Image: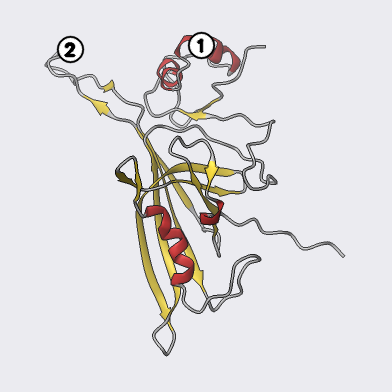
Amino acid sequence: MPEPVRLEKAELRQLDAEFQSEIKRENWTKVQFNPETMKVTYANSLKTPDGAGDQTGPAARQFVGAGTTKLSLQLWFDVTAPMPEGMAKERDVRKLTQKVAYYITPQEEDSKLVPPAVRFIWGSFQFDGIMEGLEESLELFSPEGRPLRASMTLNLSQQRITRFVFRDAGAGPGGAPSAGSSPLAQAASGMSLQSLASAAGKGDDWQSIASANGIENPRLLSPGQLIDLNAKPR
């Protein structure tokens, strides 16, 4: 008889201020139900130069920043449903949702109040950022007035265009991405390979990156094109 398939649960983990190490494991929390969809949004900061170019034609746009990356998703919690392994049975759904709300609660750091850095992981997917928005809706109540079911809409952001990170889905807590996978960068509309490499601190290597990725026209990348910035020419 085949063994039942183990369902991987998404998890929120706290990071240090440099977004490098996973810390304070007591604050990590697994979701009860995995999200149905996730939306990742990339945005660049563009500026129209003042008084530049032919004033009779359209003004040229200038890329002036590394941009932002945002993740949006919705989670559900229901104390009337069976609890996943390792998740305690509760009578009030807010006992579960408060663990998610922890990541939007500012904490004192160097005499300033800042929300904790958070890592959202699910299988091979990973996103590091700050929770900039959280909306909770209480959906079902007991006869005594206890909330039993809730939905939470999370909005996480990172102040740069982040590379894709492909985790080893079988890694344990604190596990690093698998050795056979490489972080990939995604090109925005109108971006050149030179600007993409420069944003990652690899501007001097753009020619070798172009060769390793088989790019014939480094001056214009296709929107959404994935580039391995760590690849070396063979």
Question: For this view, does 165 lie left or right of residue 48?
Answer: right
Position above or below: 146 against 157? below
Task: Judge by depth and name the residue closer to the eye, 225 or 68.
Answer: 68
Point out residue 55 in the picture as x, y percentages from the top left corner: 12, 16
Query: In the image, what residue occupies the spot 43% across and 64% down?
Result: 98
- In this rendering, position of residue 10 left or right of residue 102: right
Q: Dividing the image into 4 quarters, which one contains the C terminus?
A: top right
Q: Is residue 93 above or below residue 57?
A: below
Number of the label disc, if any, that sits on residue 42: none
Q: Give the mark toward the camera: 2 or 1.
A: 1
Residue 174 locus on image (x, y percent): 62, 43
Where is residue 73 shown, x and y percent of the image? Answer: 44, 54
Amino acid on which the number 2 mark rests in the picture? Gly
Looking at the rendered structure, the secondary structure element under dot 1 is: helix
Residue at position x 62%, y 40% in the image = 167
Nearer-the-camera pick, 143 or 153: 143
Sequence order check, earlier mark of 2 and 1: 2
